[in-house]
Each structure stands twice: as structure tokens, then as C-alpha cells.
Image (cartoon, rainbow, N blue to C red):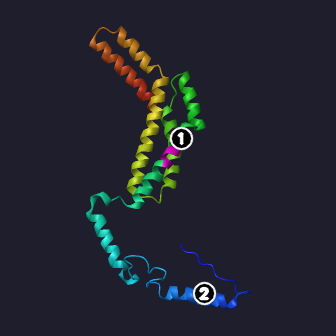
């Protein structure tokens, strides 16, 4: 950026016209010494730009250190991760989800999995709407991660708040043979499956 001060046209009209003429010459002869770009090294005319750009791109493609992912993929990755993070946070603070967490603490909740899926679907749909214009592969991968993280939150909470683990541990400690242990594990897994039905 270069700033040029000119005299006042109203008070110094002759000086103003003279300096404007000098400035005009700097534009007209911009590639000559004293011109706007004349003092720069390796100045190229606009007609040489396509060839120069092609050379630069070839260097980038040939040099693995410079072969970066496309800008749209990088932008999509960052934005989709941010949006997925926001939706996971919304899911974990959702009023219906918080009510389900409370209900589960009191005991098994019928249709827990279906209710969680319904709540989660709301945030997955919001995610889909907000990322629709980003790179398809990136948004699908980040959606899969969002779903996986949300299901892990729901599943771990349900498991932690149930007596399934405690019941399994107690039964296991009291059991003396393999058949009883197998029966105990089947019973606990059945309780878990019923609670997560619909997810």
C-alpha cells in the first residue's frame, strides 16, 4: 500500500495539477523504474500469469510437503467437527434427555432406547441441515462420530445408573460353577438389551 498526498485543488491548483500528472505517469509507466511496480524484482506482465500459476501448481503437486488437502476439505473438517460438538452438547443438556436420566435412576424405563433415539434424531437432523453445503465425505464421517459419541453417552449413563453391573458382580461372586456364571451373564445382558431396545 502506498499513500500519496496531493496539494489542495482549491488553494494550490497548479501544484495539484502538476502532481496529479506525475502520479498519472506512475500508473501509465508502472513497470518502469519509479513506477508503481517498477522497483520490484521479477515483475511479470499480466499475460504471463497463467503460465506462472501453472508452474507454481506443478511445484505444489510434485512436492509432497506442499501437497495439502483441498481448502474445502479442511474447512469442512473444522466446521463439521464444531457443529457436531455443538449438537452433542445440546443432546447432553436436552430437557427430555435429562428427564430420562432421572427416570432411569429410579429403575428400568420401558422404551428407553426408543426415547433416546427420538431425542438424538432431532440433533442429527439439525446437524444434517447445518452441514449440507460442506464436503460430503467429511460431513458423513463427522455425523457417524457424532452418533457414536451420543450413543456412548446414553449407553454408559444407562449402564452406570442401572443395577445391572452391581447385580452381575454380586451374582458372579456368589456363583461357584461355570453354568451359573453363564446364566448370570445372560440375565444381565438381557436386562441391558431390554433397556437399550430401539437405539
Q: Which residues are magenta?
A: 82-87
In the image, what residue occupies the spot 45% across and 43% down?
A: 146
Residue 18 position (above or below residue 116):
below
Residue 116 position (above or below residue 128):
above
Tell me the SS state at disc 2.
Answer: helix
> Can you tell which mark lies on residue 114?
none
- According to the picture, the residue beneath numbered tag 2 turns out to be 19
The x and y percentages for residue 141 are 39, 49
- According to the picture, the residue beneath numbered tag 1 turns out to be 89
Q: Is residue 17 left or right of residue 82?
A: right
Residue nearest the viewer, comparing 196 with 110: 196
Residue nearest the viewer, comparing 97 with 110: 97
Q: Residues within 10 Å of mark 1 (few under 14, many from 20)?
A: few
- Which SS type dominates the magenta stretch? helix
Q: Nearer the viewer, mark 1 or mark 2?
A: 2
In the image, what residue occupies the spot 43% across and 16% down?
A: 167
Residue furthest right as drawn:
11
The x and y percentages for residue 2 are 55, 74
Q: Is residue 86 magenta?
A: yes
Residue 67 position (above or below residue 80):
below
Amino acid at each position: 500500500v502506498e499513500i500519496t498526498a496531493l496539494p489542495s485543488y482549491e488553494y494550490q491548483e497548479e501544484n495539484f495539477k502538476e502532481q496529479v500528472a506525475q502520479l498519472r505517469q506512475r500508473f501509465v509507466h508502472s513497470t518502469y523504474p519509479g513506477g508503481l511496480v517498477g522497483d520490484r524484482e521479477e515483475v511479470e506482465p499480466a499475460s504471463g500469469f497463467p503460465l506462472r500459476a501453472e508452474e507454481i501448481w506443478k511445484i505444489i503437486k510434485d512436492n509432497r510437503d506442499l501437497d495439502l488437502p483441498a481448502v474445502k476439505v479442511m474447512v469442512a473438517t473444522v466446521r463439521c467437527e464444531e457443529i457436531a460438538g455443538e449438537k452433542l452438547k445440546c443432546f447432553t443438556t436436552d430437557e427430555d434427555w435429562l428427564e430420562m436420566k432421572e427416570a432411569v435412576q429410579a429403575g428400568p424405563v420401558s422404551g428407553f432406547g426408543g426415547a433416546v433415539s427420538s431425542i438424538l434424531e432431532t440433533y442429527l437432523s439439525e446437524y444434517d441441515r447445518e452441514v449440507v453445503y460442506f464436503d460430503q465425505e467429511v460431513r458423513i464421517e463427522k455425523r457417524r462420530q457424532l452418533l457414536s459419541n451420543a450413543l456412548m453417552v446414553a449407553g454408559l449413563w444407562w449402564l452406570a445408573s442401572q443395577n445391572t453391573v452391581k447385580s452381575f458382580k454380586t451374582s458372579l461372586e456368589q456363583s461357584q460353577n461355570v453354568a451359573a456364571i453363564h446364566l448370570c451373564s445372560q440375565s444381565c445382558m438381557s436386562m441391558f438389551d431390554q433397556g437399550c431396545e430401539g437405539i
